Amino acid sequence: VGESRAQQLPSLAINGIYTHVGKVTSFTIPMGNISRTFRFGTSDRFNAELSLRLPLFTWGRISGGIGMAHTGKELSVLERRREISAILYQTIQAYYSVLLNQRIIELHRSNVRRSEEFLKIAENRYKSGAIPRLEILRTEVQLKNSISQLEDANGNLQKSALLLRKLIQYPDTAIHLEGALRFNPVNAVEENIMDRALEVRSDLNAIELQQVLKEYEIQIAGSSNKPSLMFFSGYNVQNGFDPTNPDRFVDNWNLGLQLSFPLFNGFATTHKIENARLDYQKAVLQKQELQDIILLQIRQALTTLHQSALKIGSQQENIKLADEAVGVATEQFSLGIASSLDVLTAQQTLSQSEMLYSQALFNHIMAKLELSRIMEEYSWFAPELEKSLEK
């Protein structure tokens, strides 16, 4: 911006030239008893000049350049805001991915514990001769599968924690997360979210500023074949100017106006204007396309938010029913009414319901996060994140 504004200010320059001439032309004129010698210059010539130039009128070229500089500065601010929003999005996503993996580990530990407890019950019944060896084998397979799933979950937790530590600039430091996946419904009104997103989205605002830049380019391109007026002034000191005394220094000054009017530039101005207008129309189309994409993303996120909320409610009921089914099946197995397959099936159903519930919680949070990304507003997550992350 400062560089563009400097074009409006006067420019002041000083120039100095020293020249040594090997042979100086001279002639002598007899004047009675004496003669007079005249030299055209001197062997050592000095010339110093102070010059001033000030643009008076440039048909909007300088003002257009200043406008482009201001717009470029605003674009850099928007780019920084976009980068900050992207970092926040990635960090929050990584944070809740860690919480999800922690939750999955807890569920697999519960599965292992249930399998171990049921194996003890089955072994006691097998020792008493109440059930065949097949029942024990089924239970042992279930236990080993649960342990294997727990090991996989631990690996997934380590990978998600590595990503989070990298994002928060603690790649080699152990971190402790406090928090859990919670269902916190929000009042997400589609019209309000759309208005907010269309108003503050940095990439959308950037396209609008690109349109402004193209308007300035059209202005500057249109002025390239227009006249410009420049004021100039100078002060000069030099020797070798007086033929009667070439070594004497003399000074002089000047001022004036310079009018420049390009008459023909090979239709370059016309082509520049056409290209700038095409770029402007392209920016208009990009803006409309991005607006449509934003509205589509909002509707998709709201649909996911609604579906996840419904699934959370249904899975809560399913967990209660599945937990009761595990208790009933285990009791009936102890009484010899049910087989181990009935118990294992009930346990798998409970585990599946718990997993689906946790995934629904995560999907609900990610839908909120997607809406936050679209609006570039993360206040929904601020209270919990401030308390949850400790080095």
Image: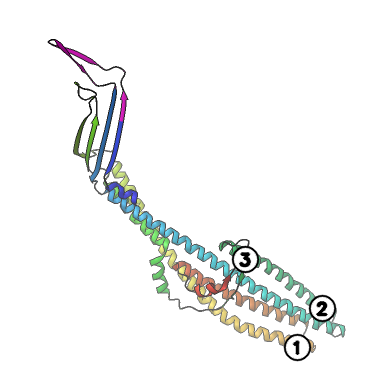
How many C-alpha atoms fall within 10 Å of the one at disc 2: few (<14), some, or many (≥20)?
Answer: many
Would you name the residue on which mark 3 appears?
161
**Residue 186 x/y as whole percent:** 48, 78
**Residue 8 x/y as whole percent:** 27, 48
Where disc 3 sits, the SS reads helix
How many C-alpha atoms fall within 10 Å of the one at disc 3: few (<14), some, or many (≥20)?
Answer: many
How many C-alpha atoms fall within 10 Å of the one at disc 1: few (<14), some, or many (≥20)?
Answer: some
Q: Who comes first in sequence, dot 1 or dot 2?
A: 2
Horizontally, is 18 left or right of 332 in the view? left
The residue most toward the left is 32
Horizontally, is 253 left or right of 105 in the view? left
The residue most toward the front is 33
Q: Residue sitting at 45 percent across and 61 percent down? A: 82
Q: Residue sitting at 44 percent across and 59 percent down? A: 80
Question: In this figure, what is the number of numbered marks?
Answer: 3
Q: Residue sitting at 27 percent across and 47 percent down? A: 9
Would you name the residue on which mark 2 appears?
136
User: What type is the residue that disc 3 sits on?
Assistant: Ala
Would you name the residue on which mark 1 appears?
331
In this view, 39 is above or below 15:
above
User: What type is the residue that disc 1 sits on?
Assistant: Glu
